[in-house]
Image (tube, grey):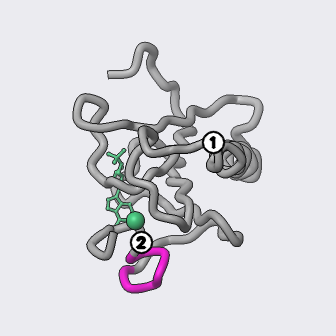
Amino acid sequence: MSDCLFCKIIAGQIPGRFVFEDHELVAIRDINPQAPLHVLIIPRRHIATLNDLTPHDDALVGSMQRAAAAIAKEHGYADSGYRTVFNVNREAGQTVFHIHLHLLAGRGLGWPPG
Ligand code: AMP
Ligand code: ZN
């Protein structure tokens, strides 16, 4: 955990472009955006992957999805559409092992995803 990129951004040790913060979550712009709006919604508490969630985290994950919806709305994408994604482990392409919800919007998003 001490070596975790997102824990360091949350602690202010590494810069991040914050778009939202509350007592349990932060949201930052992705450094390598895959869409005109690409934001990561991240819990302040370190949880490595979705596999590590417990029932105690149910409300937290709900808050993450609601924060994504609010940010999408704030940027004008509520009606046109957006996507939220959790990548889990290798085959899904997870590279940072502190859970984060990707919010993507602003272009047509293909289905199925790659
Ligand atoms: P994932 O591949 O699902 O683990 O997503 C990790 C995301 O973090 C990628 O989309 C990266 O572009 C993004 N990322 C990596 N380093 C930073 C950083 N310093 N600030 C913001 N986003 C980052
Ligand atoms: Zn962390």
The x, y position of residue 43, in whole percent, is 56, 60
Q: With respect to residue 110, does 23 lie above or below?
A: below
* Amino acid at circle 1: Pro
Query: Which residue is at the front of the view, 55 or 25?
Result: 55
Q: Does ligand 2 reach within 8 Å of label 2's beta carbon?
A: yes
Looking at marks 2 and 1 on the same chain, the residue that comes earlier in the sequence is marked by 2
Can you identify the residue that label 1 sits on?
55
Q: Is residue 15 left or right of residue 104?
A: left
Query: Splitting the image into 4 quarters, where does residue 94 fall?
Result: top left
Q: With respect to residue 7, does 75 lie above or below?
A: above
What residue is rendered at 53% in x and 58% in y?
42
What residue is rendered at 41% in x and 71% in y?
7
Q: Marks 2 and 1, Cα distance to the nearest angstrom?
A: 22 Å
User: Which residues are drawn in magenta?
Assistant: 8-14
The x, y position of residue 27, in whole percent, is 57, 61
Q: With respect to residue 79, does 32 lie above or below?
A: below
* Amino acid at circle 2: Cys
Can you identify the residue that label 2 sits on?
7
Query: Which residue is at the front of the view, 83 or 25?
Result: 25
Q: SS for tag 1?
A: helix
Q: SS for tag 2?
A: helix
Query: Which residue is at the front of the view, 89 or 30?
Result: 89
What residue is rendered at 75% in x and 37% in y?
78
The x, y position of residue 4, in whole percent, is 32, 68
Q: Does ligand 2 reach within 8 Å of label 1's beta carbon?
A: no
